[in-house]
Image (spheres, grey):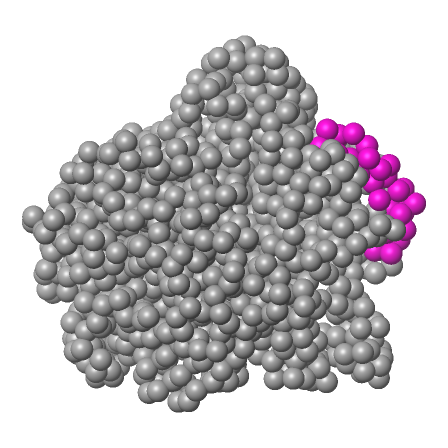
């Protein structure tokens, strides 16, 4: 049987196929088809079935990463959406937190709300913070609002009432009325999407869910249709922002949870590959054409964030914590009028791209600097499929950078790389040392097309002692999907001062969630042996507004209040460096995560190649020490256990690793490249 | 008074052709510095206890060289821009570097004795020794929620002298050669209504500088002291040159603009704040001659706060990405008449300066608009920091609460588009407290939180909208105070744009007892069910209303941001009809 994972990116759709029989893993890419991303998926799957000469029903597992929801928000291509909300609060979505996005630059505006003001309609109905009804729901007003919205062409309606995280009765009733009036509309309630307090973040998340819901539905229909047409019987899964898998049916109800789909898979995959290699603490470093994604994995588990911004709209669902900066292969090098050399944040992207790619780019990029120094093949790339124009890249760096600064082209190119490395290193410090971690305890895990190209320089700049380059770093996200488990998060929000008297009530918050979790296990047909649940209490000292997460290591009901307090204080110390004896503790959220483990084989140990590695070519490459005659290896020819001394370059389909003089590279028993610094 | 806290380097005055010694090393170094200040800032925010520093991030961190030049600052609050320079200058004046010892740290806050901005902002300054000499300083400033004085929070608009504004701290060593002076820490803490919080936060401020010190030492180890000082010189020279390029882009000349405070905080006549901006080649002079006399109350602005406001405006209008360091600040000359509200004489109170600072920003924006190309100009914004304060019994127990919120309003319209609706402008940028969080904590109910219809000034581009926040008491005896402005005149429009709407404060809005209150009110007692509503000012419009795109006007009316009646007054009935006839 075969397992296949694929990740739909902006330029390519990446595939990873694991043959469970022979344990072989294959990677390939097909060009993405942005107008209907499922087209590239079908093309790739058909190719795969044909090339491997397998039957469609031999695909036992199909998992995918998708940017459909995110792109809809970024490009504002969701459906016309309406909002029905509590009287007095229709502008919550527009005021947000009343802050301006940039302290000094007023040309950077707040995002236009996804629902314009005329489609945000207020209705009477209000409960207070103890869930007591102050004003009953005006059902007639809800009916009228729904009619108005439908008449205005709304295809989706979000229902967001104040304090609905405490009691969802008014929202549920409103949803019934709306469905009655508008049976075709996609309806999301804030208590259904995110029953968590703080209205702006909850309303925003709910509105995005509604906004992307209908088109996500249609995309999934097309996607399922194409799988069916290919004869694939396996039910496909989608990776969501917390790095777990969801069924198509769950995605239909919760499309907002897919907004970090692909990148989360990459981090989950990195954590898994690291674990197999015995490296539990990692900094993941994913460098693409326009951006660099950095995240932290500690003790084998990715760091999570409770929310992030998508096109400047807050989305609050548990997700892998990924820090993004505008630095990638396409980042443009430029001089400002006071004589400083900058790299990025503007990018030549894929189009027009670097000057050396000859597709109309005129501004020198980081990739051009790598071409000029021959770290990238100065003649052809992508295994000969793309011609490189080294002379044009040189000319651009010469004219725009080197001459004005009075430097040689090589020194200018080295400078461009040094500055890009400094920018990337700052992102790495932001997720690690700036949060109290010591980089000496971490290994760098580069992937993406340009990660391994700069990883060793970045590791040196950051004092990271070890680097692990996985196989085919350019398809890590697709590979990560094959290493993920099914999971779903639930939350219950109620602010309760924790003491021995209230503790049983706090613990009881998990009961309802557990029932829903069990129902989900049934729906997803997760075998009992594969099921697990984890419980987290988010709490704070009274008077604060930042919560810390306290993981309950036992059944919530079995946790004594004193144990919880001790765990809270330890967590507070870990997070903020101190704790306070005797200060009252408030519980804010209870979170339950249910996980259905996916059965998969352990990775194969690749066969050792006996022969000493033979370079496929020798090339003169520029390092800080000067031009050096450098062997270039095809990664597929490097057997396990082999070591190489730099200078050396290792090429593979999706990436290039650069080893500087004085550095030593080893191939571990799983086929990863390991460099100790 | 002058902004040039140290003479700028003469050699770097020559612009244009001089090359930086090593632009690549400078850029790499600048990234390292930003990492260090970010890490210090994170440490301060993460480890502090008080809501003010932890949640509102009302704090800043900075690195200085041994001569007291600011190299790099991470600021979450524009009102802190460069304000640590006042502290470091005061420290150097009080104690020469020869008398400092490794492991020392200094504390200060006083606006008259130690370059402070107002008393609640306490600075800690730590010398960094390399090879036996002071080569750098790590410094940070945090807004402490109470430092004593006549009212909780230490900011009273009606204070009559600095002595009513809390504990005055001149430059004092609080750590001596690595040993914390617990007695002094205790003295400072016990002069606050929240002693434990003070002590925790001050220790965090000291630890934050220690962290900065370790990171600077590590960097010096990695790159060498000589390369480091070379990169500092390059960085300051580069920043100065970049700003001078922007100044030379402006037309030479002099322009003035007068903004007004409704009153001086204790009632009476409006108070003029006059900004005179003079551009002469690459010199930029900001002078405030013509501004009103020293206020009787606490709306006076101390030197550090005025400089911060000036630096904020220069950075915003000329080069938002410019690094805030001495290279930038040494290009800006600031002067204001002694004995005026912008240069008060000891012992005038200065605690409630934030509204005045935002009006100073309005005056500067207005004057710059006459010298900048129109695409960089911006109409006046709400330009207030409206504060509402509720206190009373907590909701769930018998303890008391104080809830303070500073509200957003409309931004001025720009050449590039409408002003932003409902935001903080200029020297502050703090988040609201969500209604659901507020109702959980306090015996209050939020009746409405909305944009104010018709509050944005009409024009080719519309001014941003003010915010209405209406809150009612759910228990008897809730005490309410407010400190607002802009109730008498709206934010002026620019290039023919109309003014934004004024602010107003109303008790029991929408009932028969409704009553408009004055902009500064203290200790109004509310019974259960009674409410107060503050509507903050809108922003001014940009360009003639007749030039507004019809589709944008139609959207204003359809969305209820403008009423049809008001739109007909501002744009004319015919234009409104044409706009609404468009199929949108």
Which image quadrant for residue B578?
Answer: bottom right
| Left or right: B173, with A104 as reference point | left
Above-or-below relation of A449 to A507: below
Q: Is residue A129 magenta?
A: yes
Q: Residue furthest left?
A: B131
Left/right of residue B111 with respect to residue B390 in the rendered view: left
Q: Quadrant of residue A609?
A: top left
Residue nearest the observer in this picture, B371 or B72: B371
Q: Quadrant of the C terminus of chain A?
A: top left
Query: How far across and down, in percent of the image, does residue B131 sit?
Result: 7, 49
x and y, in percent, of residue A651 in the image: 27, 54
For the record, the magenta segment spans: A124-149
Q: Is residue B103 above or below residue B19?
A: above
Residue B281 position, x and y percent, is 33, 87
Residue that sits furthest to the right in the current view: A140
Task: From the viewer's side, name the closer residue of A637 and A128.
Answer: A128
Horizontal and vertical percent for residue A248?
Answer: 65, 39
- The count of marks equals 0
Q: Residue at x 25, y 45 (%)?
A: B172
The residue under the point 41% across, 30% down is B196
**Above or below for A97 versus B553:** above
Whether A122 is among the magenta residues is: no
Q: Residue at x 42, y 32 (%)?
A: B195
In-front residue for pair B422/A382: B422
């Amino acid at each position: 049987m075969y397992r296949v994972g694929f990740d739909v990116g902006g330029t390519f759709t990446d595939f990873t196929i694991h043959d469970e029989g022979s344990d072989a893993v294959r990677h390939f890419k097909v060009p993405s088809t942005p107008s209907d991303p499922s087209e590239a998926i079908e093309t790739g799957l058909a190719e795969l079935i044909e090339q491997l000469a397998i039957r469609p029903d031999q695909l036992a597992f199909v998992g995918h990463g998708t940017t459909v929801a995110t792109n809809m928000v970024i490009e504002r291509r969701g459906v016309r959406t309406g909002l029905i909300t509590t009287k007095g609060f229709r502008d919550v979505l527009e005021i947000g937190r009343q802050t301006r996005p940039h302290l000094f630059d007023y040309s950077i505006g707040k995002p236009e709300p996804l629902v314009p003001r005329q489609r945000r309609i207020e209705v009477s109905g209000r409960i207070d913070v103890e869930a007591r009804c102050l004003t009953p729901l005006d059902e007639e007003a809800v009916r009228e609002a729904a009619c108005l919205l439908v008449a205005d062409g709304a295809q989706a309606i979000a229902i967001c009432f104040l304090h609905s995280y405490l009691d969802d009765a008014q929202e549920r009733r409103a949803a019934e009325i709306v469905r009655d009036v508008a049976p075709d509309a996609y309806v999301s309630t804030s208590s259904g999407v995110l029953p968590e307090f703080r209205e702006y973040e909850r309303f925003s998340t709910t509105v995005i869910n509604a906004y992307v819901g209908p088109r996500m539905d249609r995309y999934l229909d097309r996607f399922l249709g194409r799988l069916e047409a290919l004869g694939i019987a396996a039910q496909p899964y989608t990776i969501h922002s917390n790095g777990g898998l969801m069924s198509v049916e769950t995605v239909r109800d919760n499309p907002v949870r897919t907004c970090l789909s692909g990148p989360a898979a990459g981090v989950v995959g990195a954590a898994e590959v690291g674990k197999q290699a015995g490296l539990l603490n990692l900094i993941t470093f994913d460098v693409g054409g326009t951006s660099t994604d950095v995240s932290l994995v500690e003790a084998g588990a990715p760091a999570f964030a409770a929310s992030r911004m998508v096109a400047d709209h807050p989305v609050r669902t548990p997700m892998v914590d990924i820090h993004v900066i505008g630095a990638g292969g396409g980042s443009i090098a430029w001089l400002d009028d006071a004589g400083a050399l900058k790299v990025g944040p503007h990018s030549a992207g894929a189009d027009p791209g670097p000057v050396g790619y000859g597709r109309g780019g005129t501004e020198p990029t980081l990739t051009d600097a790598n071409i000029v120094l021959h770290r990238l093949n100065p003649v052809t790339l992508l295994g000969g499929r793309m011609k490189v124009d080294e002379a044009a890249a040189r000319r651009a760096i010469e004219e725009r950078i080197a001459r004005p600064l009075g430097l040689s082209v090589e020194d200018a190119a080295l400078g461009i790389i040094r500055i890009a490395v400094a920018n990337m290193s700052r992102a790495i410090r932001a997720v690690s040392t700036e949060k109290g971690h010591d980089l000496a305890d971490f290994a760098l895990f580069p992937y993406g097309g340009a990660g391994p190209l700069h990883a060793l320089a970045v590791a040196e700049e950051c004092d990271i002692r070890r680097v692990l380059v996985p196989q085919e770093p350019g398809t890590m996200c697709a590979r990560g999907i094959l290493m993920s488990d099914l999971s779903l998060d639930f939350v219950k929000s109620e602010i309760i001062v924790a003491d021995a008297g209230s503790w049983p009530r706090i613990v009881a918050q998990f009961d309802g969630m557990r029932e829903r979790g069990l129902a989900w296990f049934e729906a997803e047909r997760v075998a009992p042996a594969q099921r697990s649940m984890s419980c987290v209490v988010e709490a704070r000292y009274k008077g604060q507004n930042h919560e810390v997460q306290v993981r309950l290591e036992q059944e919530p009901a079995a946790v004594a209040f004193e144990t919880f307090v001790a765990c809270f204080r330890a967590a507070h110390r870990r997070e903020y460096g101190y704790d306070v004896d005797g200060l009252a503790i408030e519980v804010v959220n209870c979170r339950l995560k249910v996980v259905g483990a996916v059965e998969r084989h352990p990775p194969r140990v690749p066969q050792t190649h006996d022969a000493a590695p033979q370079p496929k070519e020798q090339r003169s490459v520029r390092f800080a020490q000067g031009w050096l005659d450098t062997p270039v290896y095809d990664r597929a020819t490097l057997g396990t256990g082999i070591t190489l001394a730099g200078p050396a370059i290792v090429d593979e389909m999706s990436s290039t690793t650069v080893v500087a003089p004085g550095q030593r590279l080893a191939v571990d028993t799983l086929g990863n490249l390991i460099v100790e610094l | 008074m002058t902004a040039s806290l140290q003479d700028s380097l003469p050699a770097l005055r020559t612009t244009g052709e001089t090359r930086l010694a090593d632009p690549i090393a400078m850029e790499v170094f600048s990234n390292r510095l930003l990492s260090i200040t970010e890490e210090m800032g994170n440490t301060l925010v993460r480890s502090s206890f008080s809501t003010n520093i932890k949640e509102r991030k009302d704090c800043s961190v900075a690195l200085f060289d041994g001569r007291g030049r600011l190299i790099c600052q991470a600021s979450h609050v524009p009102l802190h821009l460069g304000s640590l320079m006042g502290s470091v200058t005061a420290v150097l004046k009080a104690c020469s570097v020869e008398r400092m010892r490794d492991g020392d740290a200094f504390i200060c806050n006083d606006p008259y004795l130690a370059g402070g901005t107002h008393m609640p902002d306490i600075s800690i300054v730590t010398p960094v020794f390399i090879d036996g000499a002071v080569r750098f300083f790590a410094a940070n400033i945090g807004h402490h929620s109470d430092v004593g004085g006549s009212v909780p929070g230490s900011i009273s608009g009606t204070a009559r002298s600095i002595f009513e504004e809390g504990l005055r701290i001149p430059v004092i060593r609080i750590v001596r050669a690595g040993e914390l002076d617990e007695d002094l820490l205790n003295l400072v803490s016990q002069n606050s209504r929240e002693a434990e919080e003070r002590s925790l936060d001050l220790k965090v401020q000291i630890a934050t500088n220690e962290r900065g010190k370790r990171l600077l030492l590590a960097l010096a180890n990695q790159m060498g002291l000589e390369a480091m000082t070379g990169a500092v010189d390059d960085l300051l020279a580069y920043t100065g040159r970049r700003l001078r390029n922007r100044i030379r882009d402006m037309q030479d000349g002099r322009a003035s603009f007068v903004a007004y405070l409704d009153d001086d905080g204790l009632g009476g006549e409006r108070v003029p704040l006059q900004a005179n901006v003079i551009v002469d080649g690459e010199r930029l002079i900001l002078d405030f001659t013509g501004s009103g006399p020293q206020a009787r109350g606490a709306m006076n602005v101390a030197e550090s706060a005025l400089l911060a406001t000036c630096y904020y405006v220069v950075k915003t209008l000329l080069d938002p990405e410019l690094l805030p360091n001495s290279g930038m600040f040494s290009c800006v000359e600031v002067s204001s008449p002694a004995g005026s509200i912008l240069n008060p004489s000891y012992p005038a109170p200065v605690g409630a300066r934030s509204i005045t600072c935002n009006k100073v920003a309005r005056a500067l924006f207005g004057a710059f608009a006459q010298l900048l190309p129109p695409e960089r100009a911006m109409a006046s914004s709400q330009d207030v920091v409206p504060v509402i304060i509720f206190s009373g019994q907590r909701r769930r127990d018998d303890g008391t609460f104080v809830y303070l919120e500073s509200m957003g309003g409309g931004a001025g319209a720009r050449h590039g588009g409408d002003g932003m609706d409902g935001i903080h402008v200029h020297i502050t940028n703090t988040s609201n407290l969500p209604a659901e969080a507020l109702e959980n904590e306090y015996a209050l109910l939020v009746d409405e939180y909305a944009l104010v219809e018709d509050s944005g000034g009409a024009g080719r581009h519309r001014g941003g909208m003010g915010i209405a926040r209406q809150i009612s008491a759910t228990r008897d005896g809730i005490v309410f105070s407010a400190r607002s402005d802009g109730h008498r005149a709206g934010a002026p429009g620019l290039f023919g744009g109309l003014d934004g709407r004024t602010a107003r404060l109303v008790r029991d809005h929408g009932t028969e007892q409704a009553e408009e209150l004055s902009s500064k009110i203290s200790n109004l007692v509310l019974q259960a069910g009674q409410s107060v509503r503050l509507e903050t000012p809108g922003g001014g419009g940009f360009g003639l209303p007749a030039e507004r795109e019809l589709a944008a006007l139609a959207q204003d009316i359809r969305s209820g941001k403008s009423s049809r009646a008001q739109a007909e007054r501002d744009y004319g009935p015919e234009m409104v009809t044409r706009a609404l006839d468009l199929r949108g």
